Image (spheres, rainbow, N blue to C red):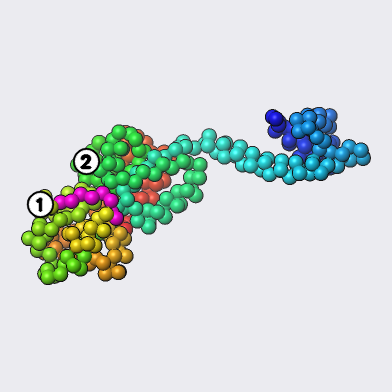
Amino acid sequence: MKLQIENLNSFIAAAENGSFSAAGRELNKSQATISIAIQNLEIDLGYELFDRSNKYPKLTEKGDRVFKNAKLMMSHYEEFVEKTKSIYSINEVRLRMGIDPLICGPEVIDILCDFSKEFPMVELFLVQQSSGNLLQEIKQNNLDLALGIFPFNEKVDCEFITAFHMHSSWVASPDFLENKAEQLSFNDFCNSPLLLPTDMSGIGIDQLKSAPQLWHVEDIHTILTLCRKGLGVTFLPNFVIANDLELGRLEKVSLSFNLLNNDHWRTSVIWPKNRLLGPASDWLQQRFTAIQHI
């Protein structure tokens, strides 16, 4: 069965207006055209939609059921037509974006929620990988935009703009810190596994280069689990460790040799070299760079 949209429109107009002539005036068609359209619809369905025995046509019981379903279907059809038209006016139908899970804090989540309202017609492909992997995906043009922690010397092959500071802290378990000084010495620091979620060459602690027990673990939950068990120390965003600090499962660690006292990373938004950002990508870039700190 193939029902014609025009026949359905004629039927709905006749049912709503109470006559074929009134339906014709509404649709700017002749009464005969309306009548033929409804007859063709009745042939397609195999039953009568109107009782024509009186002066004005009256819906049959089946016709009344069809009218209600047709109204519902046409509302969806009109919505489909409007959305299809809106797609024509946008430059980005799909957006492939990467975000390092390490920096996906509440402010970033809020921006993603706002994005869904601002660009409801853009299909978003969200990739969550380490910053190092996201950088390679951008360089290979597999992503349109990425938010992460990227060392300056590695961003030269991309377009980029610096974004927000992400406040972070060194932490360890109470068991690990037992019998240690208030400030962790360089000797204790080097004799313990350092659980690092990403490349930390940009935070200004040169001693990291000589640390013999560096563990690079991309999964944040694994780092937290290992750290809670007293394996070593880690450096994580404050929003990630807030719950563990509150519950006493982790404690902040002060490093006696960290003269710079750095406690943050600087994030960046990057995109492929020589590519202009579309409206959706540009909106995200502006929102991310408007954040001051997390």
Residue 27 appears in which quarter of the rendering? top right
Q: Residue at x 22, y 62 (%)?
A: 229
Q: Is residue 113 magenta?
A: no
Q: For the view shown, which residue lies furthest in the left direction?
A: 187
**Three-letter code, disc 2:** Glu
| Amino acid at the residue labelled 1 | Pro
Determine the residue positioned at 42% across, 55% down: 110
Left or right of residue 189: residue 96? right
Q: Position of residue 80 (x, y in %)?
A: 60, 39
Find disc 2 in the rendering and name its residue. Answer: 154
- Work out whether residue 173 or residue 52 is closer to the camera in this orientation and state it: 173
Q: In which quarter of the view is residue 186 placed?
A: bottom left
Residue 218 visible to the viewer: yes
Residue 22 left/right relative to 146:
right
- Give x and y (percent) for residue 112: 42, 50
Is 284 in front, or is 44? 44
Membership of 220 in magenta stretch:
yes
Question: Which region is colored magenta?
Answer: 214-221
Relative to 117, say whether 261 is above or below.
below
Q: Residue at x 78, y 32 (%)?
A: 46
Q: Position of residue 201 (x, y in %)?
A: 17, 49
The image quadrant where one finds the C terminus is bottom left
In the image, which is nearer the foreground, mark 2 or mark 1? 1
